[in-house]
Amino acid sequence: MNAITVGRALSVLAIVFLAFDTAIKLTGASVVEETLGALGYPQNLGFTIGVVELVCLVLYAVPRTAVLGAILLTALFGGGIATHIRVGSPLFTHILFGVYLGLFVWGGLYLRSAHLRELVPLTR
């Protein structure tokens, strides 16, 4: 299995997970309202966050705009990380979850994009 195949697999896993996450926000699932309330946010923000996440996800899924999408998704994950730090969530399961997602998003993009590997070489 080559790096491009692994990169595509990581990207697909990230896209599938984030598509599910976006869908539950856009459909107004009760778990979203409950979680937002527990985190100190207005419960009606789920749809708005879902729209932002959907835009970032579409940008990431389209090869021409994938880097922009990855940057915006990283910002979204950073907001989640900051929220979980603020409320004192567990480190490995909640606070670092955005880091794990970021590794899938950027790892997948890095492995499938020769241009990105040229721009940011890990070895010389």
Image (cartoon, rainbow, N blue to C red):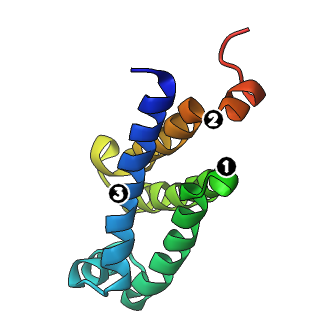
Residue occupying the point 50% across, 45% down: 105
- As rendered, which of 3 and 26 lies closer to the eye? 3
Q: Name the residue beneath numbered marker 3.
A: 16
Where residue 39 sits: x, y (%)? 36, 72
| Contact between labelled residues 2 and 1, with CB atoms less than 8 Å apart | yes
Where residue 50 sits: x, y (%)? 45, 77
Q: Earlier in the sequence, mark 2 or mark 3?
A: 3
| Contact between labelled residues 3 and 1, with CB atoms less than 8 Å apart | no
Give the total number of marks visible in the rendering: 3
Tell me if mark 1 has few (under 14), some (14-19) or many (20+) residues whose alpha carbon lies within 10 angstroms of its own. Answer: many
Q: The disc labelled 2 sits on which kind of residue?
A: Ser
Q: The disc labelled 3 sits on which kind of residue?
A: Val
Question: To which quarter of the image does residue 122 belong?
Answer: top right
Q: Name the residue beneath numbered marker 1.
A: 67
Residue 57: tell me if it is visible.
Answer: yes
Question: To which quarter of the image does residue 115 belong?
Answer: top right
Q: The disc labelled 1 sits on which kind of residue?
A: Val
Tell me if mark 3 has few (under 14), some (14-19) or many (20+) residues whose alpha carbon lies within 10 angstroms of its own. Answer: few
Q: Name the residue beneath numbered marker 2.
A: 113
- As rendered, which of 115 and 95 lies closer to the eye? 115
Residue occupying the point 53% across, 57% down: 61
